Image: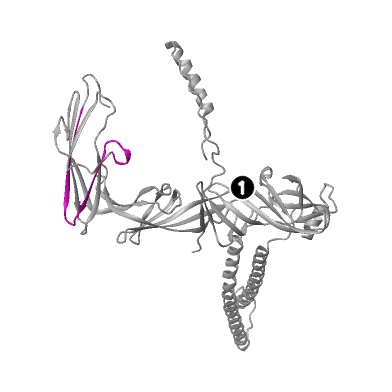
Amino acid sequence: MRALVLCLALFPTVLWADDIPLETAVAAVTVYPDGATVTRQVPFELPAGQHRLILADLPRDTPLAQVRVAVAGATLGAVTTRSDFVPPRSPLEDAVVEAAEAKVAELEDRLRSGEAEVRTIRLEAVAAEARADFLGRIGADGGPLPAETDALLELSAMIKGTTLSALNEAHEAELRADAADRALDDVREELEEARRTLAALVPETEERAYLAVSVSAAEPAAGELTISHPVDAAGWVPVYDIRLNRAEGRLAIARGAFVRQETGENWRQVALTLSTARPSGQLAPSEVRPDRRRAVDPDEVLPLRRSGMAGIAADAPAPAPVVEARPEADAISVRYVYPEPVDIAAGADRVRLALGTAELAAEVAARAAPLWDDTAFVVAGVTNDTGEVILPTDEAMFYLDGRFVGRQALSLIPAGDAAELAFGPVEGLRLSRILRNRTEGDRGVIRSGNEVVEDVWIEVENLTGEAWPVRLVDRVPHSEQEDLKVTWEAEPAPDAVDVDGKRGVLEWRFDLAAGEAREVSLFHRMIWPDGQVLR
């Protein structure tokens, strides 16, 4: 704080004697799918009179035009912001980072001292080996030797003893050096761990913005300054673990969220709220303009089309962009208030938070589409009666009776809406689809100049050893032209036609016991006028 005051004293702008420097921290954050609203709260004390509360620690990319300031305990005046010519921040480092750096430095000193001691011991071995080598060369280079036998024997004994002593000294020094080096292994491991710990501490960016808030009070006061502003570099995505219990007919959706932020400052112990609102998206409805039409001569058609295309392009709207959180829903969005403070490091952490588990009744069946597949798939039909929106996500993990079956995207399920979720294939439910008649080389298709007839045989065979409710889906062509006549028939008749509003899509519903098979015959004919082509 004293360093910050000194920096402000050197700032080129003339500062009032009653400027009060403050240090802020993020207190609360509301995170949207794209972006967030950051709130800072900092207490202050001031004497009577007019003053300026000085904040020089906002992130450099703070959208200063969108900063909103509130003051409790004093009268709010003018608010001044700037992103250039900002006084430097206090040089004091984060205590955790400082302690981690000190630990690394201390271990590096210990390792350097230990390795120096090992090198000293190895030098003793080198010196002893050099002495032994020197003794071994006596007389070998042609130098004089004693002529008397006694003197020669005495010299030989001296060389032997001294050489042996030197070699023993070298060996003993090597042993001590190896032992000393091994003793440093613990220091090396501790140093590596300390370096990893330091590397995991995410430093904040140094660039900052400046905010000066004019306040006044008739008498000495204590209050709180609140600053809020949006940020773009943050967001969250839903993540679900979806578990189907076939025996109980229940579907559990364990909801969670991945939260990330790259704002340039770490969020420490913040009150976190997740919101499904999208402030960065489209706020106003698209405008419907008049559609003026007129009849023109043929040579005017091309210029008119060009003009019309240009007008459409110009008028087109821009595209719309475990502790569990407590949901708060309204008719527009859902907010999840997390009950505990949260830490999120800038540009590093991807924090997962639990949003509660939704329990839904499920109608389990095997859906068979023999037009494309050779096996049926487990599906669960559910209705979202939770009163909350189940958000779309690409991060959904699916489990069937406790077994992981795969990851797939989940579409939006509004409150009160129905949906069908798939949980993988049933390999023992085999599907066959055969075109039975042959004409003109096309299997199962009879063609003439203005007629096509198709006769299909479908079979579902249950080889699983248990009974399955089956939902068999197929299709017949449909026409919206009076001249193209389409007729069809099926045996047995389908239980539903135009399923989910899809013209020509048929569905049969039946229970299939273990070891049984069910057949369906499907026939259709298309006739159109002579001289026309079927598309």
Residue 174, image quadrant: bottom right
Q: How many marks?
A: 1
Q: Which residue is mark 1?
A: 231
Query: Seen in the image, is 114 located left or right of residue 401?
Result: right
Magenta: main secondary structure: strand
Question: What range is drawn magenta here?
Answer: 498-526
Q: Where does the C terminus fall, quadrant-wise?
A: top left
Tell me if I can see residue 239 in this picture: yes
Q: Is residue 508 magenta?
A: yes
**Image location of residue 202, percent across then percent down:** 61, 58
Residue 108, image quadrant: bottom right
Q: Residue at x 68, y 47 (%)?
A: 68
Query: Seen in the image, is 435 located left or right of residue 161?
Result: left
**Image location of residue 405, percent across then percent down:** 35, 56
Query: Seen in the image, is 88 located left or right of residue 170?
Result: right
Report the front residue among 434 and 477: 477
Query: Seen in the image, is 321 located left or right of residue 223?
Result: left
Q: Is residue 345 magenta?
A: no
